[in-house]
Amino acid sequence: MKTIVITGGTDGIGAGLARHYLAQGDTVVAIGRDAAKGAALTRLGAHFIGADLSLVAENQRVVDLLASRFEAIDALILCARYFRSHRHETPEGFEACFALEYLSRFLLSHQLLDRLESAPAPVVLNVSGPGAPKPEIRWEDPGFRRGYSGMEAQFHAGRANDLLGLSFAAEHPDARTRYVLVNPGSVASNFAGEFDPDTAAIVQRMKRTATPVDRIVPHLAALVDAPPAAPVSAFVIDRRVDPRMSGADDRAAVRLHRLTTRLLRP
Ligand SMILES: NC(=O)c1ccc[n+]([C@@H]2O[C@H](COP(=O)([O-])OP(=O)(O)OC[C@H]3O[C@@H](n4cnc5c(N)ncnc54)[C@H](OP(=O)(O)O)[C@@H]3O)[C@@H](O)[C@H]2O)c1
């Protein structure tokens, strides 16, 4: 029996994966904000941790809770996301999309490594957007103080996650934990967020035409159950792609790791 921790495990793709692993008899920890969604999952046998992962302090609390409850974590699946058409800053002063969709994943990936390494075949599945063209990191303004757009903030976080995969492998060269980046394609999930009318219309259209969650889950579960041997790998659904956009990505990954460490310094 495995222990599977899923951020954004209360809805959309994360909840689909939670139901999949519960049906297999695994221990599932779903993390999200919504207590009612959490209660629905606990009725199926999951553990629920209510947390706002856009806050660094909450990520720290989640790490401590997980470390106190579980000796080993077989899989960390990163799915939490929230779209905002208008820029929002967290009480800690970070732009909310960057905080939730990148900083949280950075913190959980690195800080849960010792629990992952205690499992026989550990994996981090970062569900984001590899294999798609994305903008370069905004080195001087990662929090979009200038020129915010909800879509660009999403793509920027996706780019940061690609680089997180590379720097995670570089930072922990002896780790057995495999880092797998996966782009699930267009999936009819909940698409949680606060949308302006134009974006809301796009989202409604996407929800009608996108792949149902339950059809995408087996592809993602296959990556968790049998990750490639490479320390970092990337997929668009089940098609393997290069985790790098260019030969300069390894240097960019080191640079982003340093920048992130600086940003997170109290
Ligand atoms: N759906 C797609 O077409 C698509 C395409 C490419 C990539 N992806 C990636 O797939 C992953 C899953 O996306 P999805 O479409 O399944 O998302 P979704 O249906 O919108 O669900 C988002 C999840 O994130 C949680 N969440 C939101 N804000 C949170 C916060 N501040 N703290 C903690 N949890 C929070 C929500 O939980 P609560 O409601 O309980 O807060 C929910 O469980 C994301 O990483 C996304 O970037 C999706």
Image (cartoon, rainbow, N blue to C red):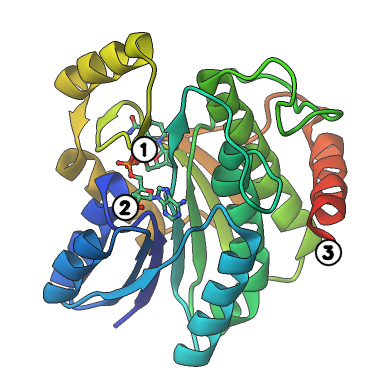
Q: Find numbered disc 2 in the image and state the secondary structure of the residue it sits on.
A: helix
Numbered mark located on residue 191 in the image: none
The residue depicted at 52 percent of the width and 57 percent of the height is 53
Q: Earlier in the sequence, mark 2 or mark 1?
A: 2
Report which residue position mark 3 lands on: 266
The percent position of residue 131, horizontal first and vertical second, equals 53, 26
Q: Amino acid at mark 3?
A: Pro
The residue depicted at 39 percent of the width and 62 percent of the height is 6
Distance from the alpha carbon under mark 3 to that under mark 1:
40 Å
Q: Is residue 242 visible?
A: no
The image shows residue 128, relative to residue 19, as above or below, that is above
- On the rendering, which quadrant does ligand 1 occupy? top left
Q: Amino acid at mark 1?
A: Asp
Report which residue position mark 1 lands on: 238
Q: Is residue 169 visible?
A: yes
The residue depicted at 78 percent of the width and 26 percent of the height is 138
Q: Nearer the viewer, residue 46 or 56?
A: 56
Q: Earlier in the sequence, mark 3 or mark 1?
A: 1
Q: Amino acid at mark 2?
A: Gly
Observer-side mark, 2 or 3, equals 3
The image shows residue 170, relative to residue 237, as above or below, that is below
Report which residue position mark 2 lands on: 14
